[in-house]
Image (cartoon, rainbow, N blue to C red):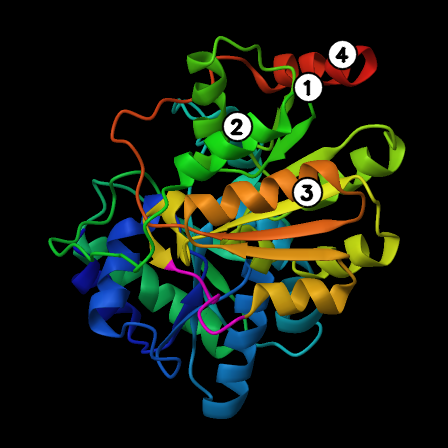
Amino acid sequence: MKVEHLIDILGTDFFTGVPDSQLKGLCDYLMDMYGTDPRHHLIAANEGNATAIAAGYHLATGNVPVVYMQNSGEGNVVNPVASLLHGKVYAIPCIFIVGWRGEPGVHDEPQHVCQGEITLRLLSDMGIDHFVVGKETSEGEMRAKMKEFALLLQKGRSVALVVRKGALEYEGKAVYENPYRMRREQIIRAVAQVSGDDPVVSTTGKASRELFEIRVENGQGHGRDFLTVGSMGHSSSIALGIALHCPGKKVWCMDGDGAVLMHMGAMAVIGQTAPENLVHVVVNNGAHESVGGMPTAIRGVDLKKIAEGCGYAHVYGASEERELLRALELAKKEPGLTFIEAKAAIGARADLGRPTTTPVENKDAFMEWLRDV
């Protein structure tokens, strides 16, 4: 189904959410049509944030909003759906568009398998009626289903369209870029070099994929690294837990701007506990690149000032390799909680692969490394 037809059927002009590769056609359409005009399209920090914004839109206008997300984001919407939108509370209607990663019977990455299995069940448990949209779904079927859903929406119920891979088509293609020159892989390579045998926790998406391939290229094993293949936004918290309980080891966290925004409160907790052996490196390209390149809400945000305000002892910024290496080498030598923001270009190698080890194998090797090194 063409995205334009879907938008016409939905009959709404306000969209908020978190980008998903499975919904790339929808995301590109919204960027082409509205850009980031917050009156019509707002890219949220996380899916719960989007749901609350959507509730505010309804309260202000009486109209029905759309929240888009990958099914991994369902966990982030449980609280606002169950305790804000639900008919037993405020009865605020919302249309959710959910990209279905890990659909049973469809091969996907391990972090999507469990979420894919429970996607429809979670929606049902939250009282959200849903309709699965596939390549075969016709415009007529979609219109008929939305007529049914309209009756539920009028009663303050929420509904969901669960979108299978390839179900939405859009002929346009948005181009995402920024003025920075360092590549993310270049930054990760520098961290791998300077950190030596120290443990590294890398965020979800292409950062972990690039770190894995850098280790292969260097002839190294993967025991040094914990690859956070799912749970976006939680890498820094994982690294904090490790740093607090391995005080004799320097622990490095390879994070991203979208991940930091998703659960920014983690930085306050890190600053409060202030482990002297934690280095928090944020690769900031201003984009949700692993799911298509749409911008994050980082524009205009000074991450270094946030780190300082949260209590990080040392704060550095880098937009070229010389600055980055200097900051990394200082972080390696000096004690104290350290934050490094590395500005990066958007883009990755076309032939970038995926880890060839399972998450459990990665966990076991990493725990053994922590014990023995």
> Would you say residue 230 sits in the magenta stretch?
no
Q: Which numbered disc, 1 or 4, marks the residue that appears first in the sequence?
A: 1
Real-space CA distance between mark 1 and mark 3, rounded to the nearest whole angstrom = 26 Å
Q: Is residue 47 left or right of residue 63?
A: right
Real-space CA distance between mark 2 and mark 1, rounded to the nearest whole angstrom = 18 Å
> Would you say residue 299 sits in the magenta stretch?
yes
Number of the front mark, 4 or 3: 3
Q: Which residue is mark 4?
A: 368
- Dot 4, how many residues are within 10 Å of its Cα: few (below 14), some (14-19), or many (20+)? few
Amino acid type, label 4: Glu
Task: Name the secondary structure under disc 4.
Answer: helix
Amino acid type, label 1: Lys
Q: Which residue is mark 2?
A: 113
Number of the front mark, 3 or 2: 3
Q: Is residue 33 left or right of residue 262?
A: left
From what the image shows, is residue 56 above or below residue 286? below
* The furthest residue to the bottom: 60
Which residue is at 36% across, 22% downward?
353
Real-space CA distance between mark 4 and mark 3, rounded to the nearest whole angstrom = 25 Å
Real-space CA distance between mark 1 and mark 4, rounded to the nearest whole angstrom = 9 Å
Amino acid type, label 3: Ala
Q: Read off the magenta span.
A: 295-301
Q: Which numbered disc, 3 or 2, marks the residue that appears first in the sequence?
A: 2
Of the numbered discs in the image, which one, if any, rests on residue 363?
Answer: 1
Of the numbered discs in the image, which one, if any, rests on residue 331?
Answer: 3
